Amino acid sequence: MLEELLEKIGGLTLAEAAELVKMMEDKFGISAAAPVAVAGVAVAAGEAAPAVEEKTEFDVIFDSFSGDKKVDAIKKVREITGLPLMDAKKLVEEGKGTLKEGVAKEEAEKIKKDLESIGAKITLK
């Protein structure tokens, strides 16, 4: 039965897969991350990939710091990364370091907002 269901889902067009996902979200209250997974099934089954896919994971890059809240920046970097004090201090003073990799968009934006509010320059990639 599951094999048969999988074959049917694999035969859906991208538009049909998207509609199925919407219906599943409504019925079961599943998260918005599901469209990527179902779209992946359609792509694996031979469908064309969508022209533009929204990025779901980001790397948070610490570019530089210029401000009078250096101690706060070091504390925040330690909180985010779990780095030892000296490593966090070095990152804040020298700039250019990856704070986190592969984080959700909401978390990445929160980290960026928190650090920029105390004088850091952050890039999301």
Image: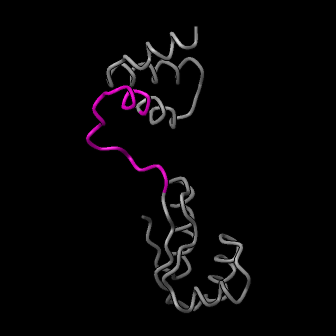
Q: Position of residue 12 (x, y in %)?
A: 36, 17
Instruction: Identify the residue shown where x is 51% and y is 32%.
Output: 34
Specify the quadrant of the image occupied by residue 73.
bottom right
Residues 67 and 53: in front is: 53
Specify the quadrant of the image occupied by residue 47.
top left
Q: Residue furthest top?
A: 1
Instruction: Identify the residue shown where x is 59% and y is 25%.
Output: 29
Residues 53 and 29: in front is: 53
Residue 63 is a magenta residue: no
Residue 53 is a magenta residue: yes
Residue 10 shown left or right of residue 34 in the figure: left
Q: Which secondary structure class fits the magenta region best? A: loop
Total numbered badges shown on the rendered structure: 0
Q: Position of residue 93 (x, y in %)?
A: 56, 92
Q: Is residue 81 above or below residue 24?
A: below
Residue 61 shown left or right of residue 90 in the figure: left
Instruction: Identify the residue shown where x is 51% and y is 82%.
Output: 119
State the extent of the magenta-drawn residues as a range. Answer: 40-57
For the C terminus, give its image quadrant. bottom left
